[in-house]
Amino acid sequence: MKSYLELTATEMQEQLDAAQAQYQDYVAKGLKLNMARGKPSPQQLDLSMPLLDTVSAQTSADILREGTADDLRNYGGLIGTPEARELMATIMGVDAADVIVCGNSSLNIMYDLVSQVYAHGIAGQPAWAKLDAPVKFLCPVPGYDRHFALTESFGIEMIPVPLGADGPDMDLVEDLVSKDPAIKGIWCVPKYSNPTGTTYSDEVVSRFAALKPAAADFRIYWDNAYAVHDLQQPGDSLLSIKDACEAANNADLWYMFASTSKITFAGSGISAVAASDVNLAEIKGRLTLQTIGPDKLNQLRHSLFLPDADAVGAHMQKHADIVAPKFETVLRTLEAGLEGTKVGTWTRPAGGYFISFMGLPGTARRVISLAKDAGMILTEAGATYPYGDDTEDVNIRLAPTYPDVDEIADASELFVICVKIASLEALMA
């Protein structure tokens, strides 16, 4: 397809008229499409329905641990059942001893951890709330909107760091972290990043592990949400942040988070935090004040349903069988409709839940508005940047997982038309 940048004014108008006619056809259909959030589809959630029967099928005293301190129906078990810790360790690529299993949401753990450090401090350092200078976090962009909203809610200053094909700009990260003691953390989605699908290279992970922060309470907040969410085999590999930090004599530099939210049930899974012994000791100390224990029966259900790495792998292949065709439909439509036009680029992730589209400057909001008027909801413009500030107005996050394949086909075609209209309008302005 000819580059739109090379079209004459007359050719641009002809292309715009054609795209607008196609757009009106879609408006007339009265579509109700949603590619705004990375939700598992009903078909994916159906995969885990047998999980609900696991406990009722195991009624012996040994399983329920009746009459012992480990009775899973009772209080206690603050750090999770041994089996659930093994399961989450398998998913996270660490040892069970490194893991605390909590409730259904890893985002909840992240919020609690930031809140607790804000109020009480860590590593013998003052609570952030008592500091004279504002606390700062580094935020790879485009990135996860909920990380940014969480951080902003505490009044923490967010500093954008460009995210490249192999991870964040580590020259910038190293420079900022080493010079500014107000920088207390960095958010990372290291495998199949939200929204780009980027997996950090071994070099990037090693450079993270070797950071020399000016702040003694600086931590890497390693949100490994898509650790086992490959769309193809083999999927991307990710170097262990734990092993890399230990090799760099920085054993306490990291926290890792994960959940089964996109493995079993999105609202009824289990979540976990992993960290060094020193960091875990501080977390455990605060947990004793915060809770009397997690939902251990839900942990039991999960460990019975996914007893080992092979079971996890087989289950995630079923997810991939459902999700991969949706990604393929979006990518195929983008290529057919926009390849060669030079009005946008997009990622081709090997896993995760999102495709990131980068359009011409000043077009993202227009594309999203056009899509909404035609019955398709996309993630709000600017959401993938701190403070919603995508200064060039270029990034759009596409979430193909929830709609069915037919809906994805319509949504992708409509998206391409909206991109064409917005791009031609911008070029003709």
Image (cartoon, helix red, strand yellow):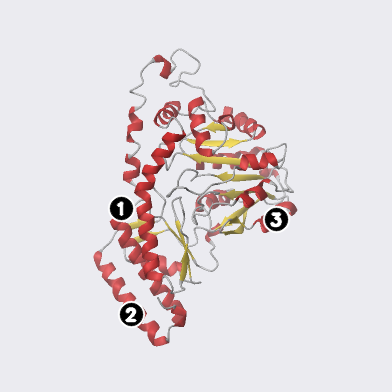
Q: Indicate whether 301 appears above or below 363.
A: above
Q: Is residue 320 left or right of residue 198?
A: left
Q: Indicate whether 343 appears above or below 406.
A: below
Look at label 2 and name its amino acid.
Asp
Q: Which residue is mark 3?
A: 176
Q: Position of residue 352 (x, y in %)?
A: 46, 50
Question: How far apart are labels 3 and 1 at the CA level?
Answer: 44 Å
Q: State the SS at label 1.
A: loop
Look at label 3 and name its amino acid.
Leu
Q: Which residue is mark 2?
A: 17
Q: Pick whichever, 35 or 288, lies toward us.
A: 35
The answer to whether one can see residue 40 in this image is no
Q: Indicate whether 288 appears above or below 129.
A: above
Q: State the SS at label 2.
A: helix
Q: Which residue is mark 1?
A: 404
Question: How far apart are labels 2 and 3 at the CA level?
Answer: 49 Å
Look at label 1 and name its amino acid.
Asp
Q: Position of residue 425 (x, y in %)?
A: 42, 78
